[in-house]
Amino acid sequence: MLASLHMTTPSPVRPPLSIVILAAGQGKRMKSDLPKVLQPLAGKPLLAHVLDTAKQLSAAGIHVVYGHGGDRVREVLAHEPVQWALQAEQLGTGHAVAQALPAIPDDHLVLILFGDVPLIKSETLEQLLASVDDQSIGMLSVILRDPTGYGRVIRDHAGHVVRIVEHKDANTKERTVPEGNTGVMAVRAQSLRKWLGALKNDNTQREYYLTDIVSMAVREGLRVKAVPAPTEIEVLGANDRTQLAQLETALRSERATHLLVAGAILADPLRVDVRGDVTIGRDVFIDVNVVLVGNVRLGDRAHIGPNCYLEDCEIGSDTRLFPNCVVTKTTIGAACSIGPFARFRPGARLEEGVHIGNFVEVKNSHVGKGSKANHLSYLGDATIGEKVNVGAGTITCNYDGANKYRTEIGDGSFIGSGTMLVAPITVGANATIGAGSTLTKNAPEGKLTLERAKQMTIEGWKRPKKKT
Ligand code: UD1
Ligand code: CA
């Protein structure tokens, strides 16, 4: 019966959203030549992390306020759908937001993010956005164990937020407040424009503080809704190398947990680095110190040994990588045995059941089903058929100093150890090449081909002796 009494309240329509990301700061405390927002976290610039989150919020526009290292910042994100606003001089966070405002219509809701706070989650931001209406502004606050350095959220006796005081401007009592300002705010553009225009820099830092708009809103009778961030790490800024390392550790652990939840077996969740998007099958095993970069796909029961580096690659089901392999832009089929110490460069493609052993390098080559190169080889620009045996020390001599040439090796052939295949060259199917040959001409199929000087023994020869 109760159900029939339930009234559906229409959810208020959210105004169009504009996001402003502040990224003009230099980040002096990083002691780096790289602008702060370009410092890498899990292999990706801090600003790119914020941008990826911003893109999940279906905003009408994303504006990046840049300044320090401007050209490099714009270059790195040149392909991103953002509008740029230059803040030539860093006069404070309020001044920074003001640089983006001319491009934002009055009826938009403006969400302000910091380019150096990379782990903020879109869910948290959605909550903040949902909390604001035209009678309020929203801010993300955080309860801190050590709020030193943060702006403090000051509330009245009724518990309503009345203003924010920066750490440097706060008195002893205000500094005991554990609730900090994260810097993330959501405000209607029209009000923001008015308040930013009225900011003064009469504070210890001589800056135009964005945070001063809080007391302005209160004075006009608006509510300030402080939404608490779920965790401290989500709103941690990367101001120096220590904080950047803290963020890296946190993100590594979060991503390892994702892998575990997806079903991976990790030898040690603290010692696997995911720096991209990893897709895994069932019962995948990943040993310690494995680094996964870009797009990596690991098939069912793939086994990745310790110290492997995998970038933009696919590893087939039941394939095993022994320790210390480097795999870049490569596709490895099912049931292969790889390494230890094997190296795959871009364009390597291995079919099922291939064995590539220690100190073998494969580049831009296709290796057919069941073929083996188990020791000390270079296979570059080669097409290798099925069930080929490449002997130890075989090299495809693919480069004459100016041009690259291809080597073709037919199905079922046997390449003796220490063979130099001077490309362009073709070895026919089921051919056998004698060990130590340097082939400059094609080897016909089904026959033994070798190139070898006649062995001789010099009678009466004496080994030279050192003078005493
Ligand atoms: C700011 C907040 C503080 C909050 C803290 C959280 C103000 C006045 N203070 O302080 O309340 O607790 O963040 O981390 O907002 N930036 C520009 N242009 C400028 C100044 C800053 O783009 O002129 C950018 C920086 O690159 C950075 C962000 O704004 O991404 C924050 O600036 P920062 O100087 O780190 O502010 P805090 O002093 O830490
Ligand atoms: Ca900061």
Image (cartoon, helix red, strand yellow):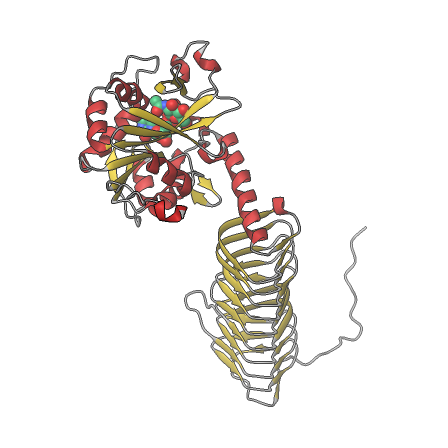
**Left or right: 190 in relation to 43:** left
| Place of residue 21 in the rendered image (x, y in percent of width and height, measured from the top left) | 32, 36
Q: Where in the figure is residue 400, as x and y percent of width and height?
A: 46, 68
- Image point (31%, 35%), residue name: 111
Judged from this view, the residue extending furthest toward the top is 172
Q: Quadrant of residue 432?
A: bottom right
Residue at left offset 35%, top offset 12%: 204
**Towards the viewer: 121 or 83:** 121
In the rendered image, residue 98, in percent from the top left (x then y), is placed at: 23, 29
Query: Residue 147 at what x, y percent from top left?
Result: 48, 21
Against 109, is 359 above or below? below
Q: How many marks?
A: 0
Q: Is residue 312 above or below residue 420?
A: above
User: Does residue 337 appear in this view?
Assistant: yes
**Residue furthest toward the front?**
1
Q: Is residue 303 above or below residue 416?
A: above
